[in-house]
Amino acid sequence: MDHDKTDQIINKYQGDASSLIQILLEIQSQNRWLPREVLEKVSKKLEVPLNRIQHIVTFYKAFSLIPKGRHEIHVCMGTACHVRGATRVLETVQDLTGIKPGETDFDLKFSLETVNCIGCCALGPVMEIDGKTHGKLAPAETADVLKNYE
């Protein structure tokens, strides 16, 4: 955990508590999660109660209090993707990574989540890795896509 980088992010917003969510997002972007020590530092520097910060980071799904993998995989399970085989795509991802939705592998390489909609239903089934969308996937193609992130 780079404490200097955390300070730089907080200082970028002049320690303005109204920028709390953006500060937390940037810190998480750097570290791939929000350890308690960082939350305590943000609380102290912004003069925001720690319990308020805890409430925010547990309310929004964008935040993680556990380490995330270098590559975040989101498999869409919305209706359009589901009827086109999203379950098979998800099963393939689980088999290849050894993790289930909500988990991160031991090497901190992959984290897996399911989502209700990515917003490109015509491309279903869809998987997003690190913000890049991969659509019209079959299980074999899913394996090929994952190889690009090794």
Image (spheres, rainbow, N blue to C red):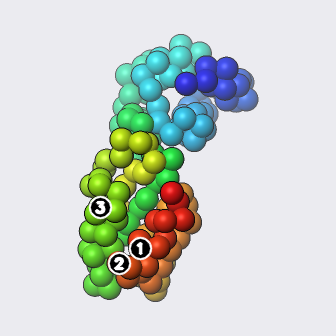
- For disc 2, the marked residue is 139
Q: Is residue 139 above or below residue 11?
A: below
Asked if the residue at tag 2 contacts the one at tag 3, i.e. Cβ–Cβ closer than 8 Å, the answer is no
Residue 76: % across, % down: 37, 69
Asked if the residue at tag 2 contacts the one at tag 1, i.e. Cβ–Cβ closer than 8 Å, the answer is yes
- Reading the chain from its start, which is encountered first: label 3 or label 2? 3
Q: Secondary structure at mark 3?
A: helix
Q: Amino acid at mark 3?
A: Gln
Q: CA distance from mark 3 to mark 2?
A: 11 Å
Give me the residue at 42% from left, 36% from top: 67
Q: Quadrant of the N terminus?
A: top right
Q: Is residue 116 above or below residue 58?
A: below
Residue 7: % across, % down: 66, 21
Q: Is the residue marked by circle 3 packed among few (<14), some (14-19), or many (20+) residues within 10 Å?
A: some
Q: Quadrant of residue 11?
A: top right
Q: Amino acid at mark 1?
A: Thr
Label annotation for residue 18: none
- Given residues 9 and 150, the one toward you in this image is 150
- Given residues 133 and 12, the one toward you in this image is 133
